[in-house]
Amino acid sequence: MNEAILSSNKEQIVNSKCSSKSYNNLCNQVSITQDINPVDIKIPNSLNIQSTNLKGNDKQHIYCLFPEEILQVLDMGIESLKSNHRQFITKKQNSALGFRSKQIYSWLYSKYTTSFDVMSNISKADRYRLNSIFSISNLNIKHIEQSSDGTKKYLFQTGDNLFFESVLILMKDRVVDDCGKVLKSEKYTFCLSSQIGCKIGCTFCSTAKGGFVRNLTSGEIVEQVVFLKRDNGLDSNKSVNIVFMGMGEPLDNLNNVVRAIKIISHKDGLNIATRRQTISTSGIVPQIAKLADMNLDVQIALSLHAVDDSLRDRLMPINKSWNIAQVLESLRNFPIRSRNKILFEYLMLHNVNDSLDHAKKLVSLLNGFRAKVNLIPFNPHSESEFERPSRERLKLFADYLYKKGIVATIRESRGLDISAACGQLRQKVINGGTLQNKPTNI
Ligand code: SF4
């Protein structure tokens, strides 16, 4: 067995703040030679107990967590960071815990630090302790694609060797100030994944083709935001919008998504207001009701994509569980601010759902809603049976909604020269580059 030898004395080991599971395991696994002082303790490599060259009292900071017990710090709100940290410190150190937690949060979310070692305003002993009980980063970057329009697509690799995607969408506006000076404004939207794969099985979706693998943890969701901010040099007060429209159905991973939203919006952390965060759902009615009860002040978007049940059944099998009428009913009382609207996503598929008749039915379905409709021209690819509608059909559809008083935007095509739709990049990189984008007429 590979072993490390830690010289210490037995009292220190017994008094150290091991979790009880770890301590029992430690007692079973270490061999202690009692006749030497200080005793030599053989530690199997599977334990995260590190010999240290720290001196004096610092040497008491001995922790013996198994790898699976190491805590993911990005998984924690500031209160949970405090309570988890509290288990490993003395009563005297407890008084500085609130301040220490804010310092850690600032390093993580203002400076986007990935190592405790660089937290220079925290003592060496504390950094040693933090290193032995928490880990910061759980993701590696496998691939980045950048479009000529500034859209960037990221393929992440998890600690358990799985892959998922995030997208950064950059919108550049030309703004003229009161003196006629032309200013540039840049708006960033981060499109986050909530699951690896998806159970919903929409027929137009690349993610669905890989099936469901697992939920992302809240830490993995938060880390997407931290990574995108760091990679694009966005400082902590640059506001961004968050949309949960990447891989997965966010309401099928509601607890982790909500925890991530609370961490992302915390004022001592990333401070991205909940009203800037949008959850997009395929329409899981009981989960919409749960989210509504939480009153988080997030925006909600429904992926509607069809105006009659027979087509929606075909495009989105979840419609067989909760049909259009049921899902619209569940949104009628969803809590939104008086100035906000419920978003309806409508994927435009050539000759499938893009006629004027479809537009008329859509208007009648949305009667009574403060609604905004996002018309999304389909991003065609080689494995899909669907095509992108012509610009003329898109415009006719949008104009009809507009005439009937519904705010409708054609979502500007972003990243057409890269694999910008959900699941496409993972398919392309991981499955050997077989997936190609088709040329479009827009
Ligand atoms: S479109 Fe969204 S909900 Fe539907 S299968 Fe793809 S990831 Fe899942």
Image (cartoon, rainbow, N blue to C red):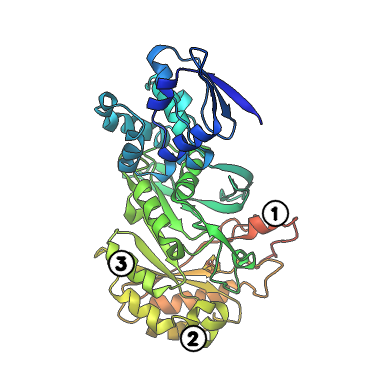
Q: Position of residue 284 (x, y in %)?
A: 43, 73
Badge 3 crowding class, 10 Å Cα cut-off, few under 14, some 14 to 19, many 20 or more, is some
Comes first in the chain, label 2 or label 3: 3
Residue drawn at x 46%, y 37% as measured from the top left? 24
Residue drawn at x 58%, y 35% as measured from the top left? 46
What distance separates the C-alpha of mark 2 from that of mark 3? 24 Å
User: What secondary structure is marked by label 3?
Assistant: helix
Q: Amino acid at mark 1?
A: Ile
Frontmost of labels 2 and 1 is 1
Q: Amino acid at mark 2?
A: Asp
**Disc 1 and disc 3 in contact, CB within 8 angstroms:** no
What distance separates the C-alpha of mark 2 from that of mark 1? 35 Å
User: Mark number for residue 109?
Assistant: none
In this figure, which residue is indicated by the disc labeled 1?
430
Toward which corner of the image does residue 373 lie, by quadrant? bottom left
User: Mark number for residue 309?
Assistant: 2
Q: Position of residue 199 (x, y in %)?
A: 54, 68
In this figure, which residue is indicated by the disc labeled 3?
292
Q: Quadrant of the N terminus?
A: top right
Residue drawn at x 37%, y 26% as measured from the top left? 15
Which residue is nearer to you in this view: 149 or 290?
290
Position of residue 358 in the picture relative to residue 93 (left or right) = right
What distance separates the C-alpha of mark 1 from that of mark 3? 37 Å
